Every structure is written in C-alpha cells, then in structure tokens.
Amino acid sequence: MTKPSRNPIAFLSYVRDDDAHDLGAVTKFRERLEGEVKVQSGQRFEIFQDRNDIRWGQYWQQRIVETLAEATFLIPITTPSFLVSPACRAELETFIRMEQTLGLNKLILPVYYVSCDAIEQGDKDDPLVAAIRQRNWTDWRPFRFTPFDQTELRAELAGLAKSIKATMQELAVIAEASRSMAVAPKPDRDAIQSSVVHAAADQEVGNPSRTKVDNPSAEYSTDVSYWVYTSEFDEVIAASELAGDSNETIHLQTDLAGEIASLKRRHLIFFQSIQITTNQRDTAVTLLLDNSGSLRSYKIRPMAAWTAILSEWFEIAGIKYEVLGYTTRSWKGGQSREKWMENGKPPNPGRLCDLRHIVYKSFDDPGSNIATNCAIMMREALLKENIDGEALLWAKERLEKQSAKQKILFVLSDGAPLDDCTSSYNPRDFLARHLAAVAISIEKAKKIELRAVGLDYDNPFYSVSNEVDTSKLGVPILEYVFDANYREAVRMKTISGDGSRK
C-alpha cells in the first residue's frame, strides 16, 4: 500500500462487509466524492480507504500533528455494524480527540448509510452516538440504491464536497495564523511599559462578569475597563482529555524523557546545590504556563521537561503545587467570534475568543501523572493564542484557597497577550492593559508572591521577572523556592568546557 499524499486527505471509516454486501457501493461513493472535491477546489483530494484490512492508524499520528493547512478528515459510513465495530469506534474516537485539541468540530463528516436504532433513539449511554448526532451528517439512506449517474445523487455529493472545500479554506486561514504566531516579533519592553503598565494602575480587575452578548448596547470605558463578548464557549479542562492516540502519546513521552535526561545532565552541579528543609513544607506553588503558538518547536520541549523536573523536586520536598496552562480553543476567535458576527458585529466587543484553561496537575492530584500530562503539552496543535490577564486571575483564585503560609505564583511566558480577533476589534493594548492591571493588583494585595520567568523575554508586566534561556527555564524557580546558591556551587567546583551551567 502506498503512503497517502501530502495534499488534504480524508480517511474512510467503514465496515468492509457493508461495502461487499452493497456490491462496492461504498467504494464507488468514495471515488465520486474524491473527484467532486477536486472539481470544486482544483486541488487533489485523496480519501484513504483500507480495502485490504491493513492497519492504517499509524498514519493518523503523522497527520494530526502536522500543519493544519494539510487538512485531515474522517468520513464514517454509519451503519449498525459500524457502531459495534471496535476498529471503527477507535477511529472515530481518535478524530474526536483531534477535534477537541484543535478547537474544531468540522473534521468528522458522518454519512448516515443504514438506519441505526441507537442513532434514531438517541442512545445517551454511547458518547460516540452523541458525537455523530451533534454533527451535520449527510443522510445517504435515500440514495443507497440510486445509480451514481442520477442527478439527485450527484447534487447531494456536490453539497458534501462544498462543505469539505469550505472547511479546507478555513483551516488554511487558521494555519496562517498559527505560523504568524510562531514567528511573532519579540515585544518591545520600553514601549509596553510606557503605554500600558502605568496607565493600568487604576484599571478595574477581577473576573469579568459583564458580557457584550448579554448587554450589546452597553458602552464600557475603553480606558479602564475590561470585558468579554461571551464566556459561553470557555473551558477548564484536564490535560488528559486533550491526549492524542496511544501511538502519538508514546512518541511524545519518549521525546520528553530524552529532554528531561538532557537537562538533568546539563544542570547536574546546580541540582547538587539544592538543599531541602522542613520550612518548605508550608509552601504552595502554582506554575502558570503560557501555552501559546509562539512556543512551538524548540521552546515547548524544555518548558514541558522543566515542568516535570520541578514537579519532582516539589514532590520530594513535600511542597503543595499545581500546574496550569492557558491558551485558546481555536484560532481566529472560534465560536465567540462566530456569535459576534451573527449578532451584527457590535463595536468594541471585548475579549473575542474561546478560552482554554488546562489543568496539568491540581493541588489535589497525585504527582504520578504529571510526566504524562507534560507530554500532552508538547502537542503543537494545542498551542494557539493567549489571554494572560484572565489566566492570571484564574490561577490566583485557585492558589488563594490553599492554607499554606507561603504562596508563590510563577508565570512562565515568552511574550505579551495576543489574540488576533480581540486585538483587531478593540482599543489598542486592550489585553495588555488588563494583564498589567491584574499583575499590579496581585502584587499590591501581598497575599501571593508573584514572579515571572520569561523565555528569552524580559517580561514588563511583573515587578519581579527573570529573563532566561529556554534551557534554564526552571533554574530561577528552584533557586527561589529552595534558596539554592547556584553561583557559589559553581565557584566551588571545577568545570571543564561549558560545564553544566548552560
């Protein structure tokens, strides 16, 4: 079997016996749909069909971690046999997880081929049935026995092809936004400080309760207020729910283990200098991780690895800690933007995207799963845009509930807040002003120690900030929590070459 091409493709998920019983009608459907998409888009569109009972799940991992511009779809040919087939169910589950990570619900295109009692009756105990029912499926039951040269059938195929073409175009736009985010220019510290931080001292802070969608005619002050268009599509989600299939997970865990081992060798002398005391047991630490698209490629690996290493030290010391991440569910605003457009695009909509706040480890979770969850962090499709102010409030409120004497909130980020949709339709520095105001309010309250670690970035929003090379990301955190005297440890030892300091 030849490997699929790099053009946009789809996987046909079906039961071979169904195709055989209908004398190859499913195969004929696949061939006609391929041709129709190519006619409408001018682009080759391969629908990959496993007709020889050969496992092809290995190709999914390769496709779903690549650029979104190379769109990958699943076309489940839904029949009673499909719903009880372990292989077909596994294929559908894989794409549901992919959609969840990407913040899309347009990559699964069900074709309702033979009536199913579970679908007709709405089986509430079967999440896959619910997933199929929630989508705009193509009802092929009236055409099952119709010759493929009939006009009515060809028109139905054309409608499905049109939907695929539209989604391909949408994904191309999203992919362009993703590439732009990954190469975003480094923010100018002086410009941010002069135009944002000082002006934000009196800005209203707190979780935004007002939304434009609830009160579209409201005129909020563009100088001191922060609001959202809608919070309907925001989510707080456990990292485990964003995992890919087992093959991808194993691959990421292997990469993470290698990165952790490399960092431990590189910083051996520093780790030897750390001293654990009983005083640290009355400490609670939150790691708040920027999971934005600019971390793709070389930055996300050390962030994930250092998070796992920091967790090991906190576990050894008996320190209470949690690990949180923040990004958005979609590029280009997602469902929030769609709702805003449906409502006539009112001006100054406020935050105009779907938040995704990720719990890699809560204070109550065991530390045994943190490495697995850190590997999930390395899924590049997860990394999108970033609304720092609301994430900081979220982390702060969770940390305040802890009873520890010392509470430390570390923010690990590589840039200023950035969401293309919000920035395009609101006053200048709308997101940056809010982040600055939230940071100032936390620092003034003095209930939590707020410290920032910038990845190749001198973060202007925080009074205490360390700019570090990505390979040293966890060093200032361990230095502060354990009072490790790194410079003295290095001075007292002989180091050859570039040693272990870098």
Image: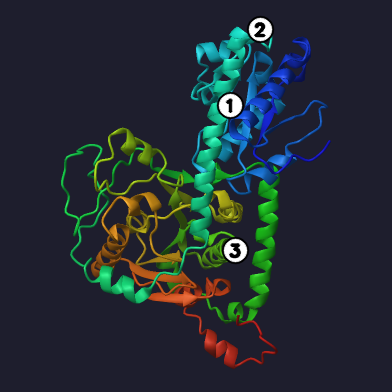
Q: CA distance from mark 3 to mark 1?
A: 43 Å
Residue 290: mark in rendering: none
Give the image quarter of residue 408: bottom left
Q: CA distance from mark 2 to mark 3?
A: 57 Å
Residue 46 locus on image (x, y percent)? 70, 33
Q: Which residue is mark 2?
A: 146
Residue 220 locus on image (x, y percent)? 17, 50
Q: Sequence order check: which comes first, mark 2 or mark 3? A: 2
Give the image quarter of residue 257: bottom right
Left-right relation of 463 to 366: left
Residue 365 locus on image (x, y percent)? 50, 50
Above/below status of 472 relative to 396:
below
Q: Nearer the viewer, residue 141 or 278?
A: 141
Give the image quarter of residue 255: bottom right
Which structural element holds mark 3?
helix
Above/below status of 399 relative to 446:
above
Residue 161: mark in rendering: 1
Which structural element holds mark 1?
helix
Residue in the image at 51% along x and 65% along y:
314
Left-right relation of 456 to 271: left
Residue in the image at 49% along x and 77% along y:
479
Residue 461 locus on image (x, y percent)? 33, 69
The answer to whether residue 187 of the structure is visible from this angle is: yes
Above/below status of 430 relative to 236:
below
The three-letter code of the residue at mark 1 reads Ala
The three-letter code of the residue at mark 2 reads Thr
Which structural element holds mark 2?
loop
Neighbor class of circle 2 (other Cα within 10 Å; few <14, some 14-19, many 20+) is few
Residue 305: mark in rendering: 3
Q: CA distance from mark 2 to mark 1?
A: 19 Å
Q: Which mark is nearer the camera, 2 or 3?
A: 2
Neighbor class of circle 1 (other Cα within 10 Å; few <14, some 14-19, many 20+) is many
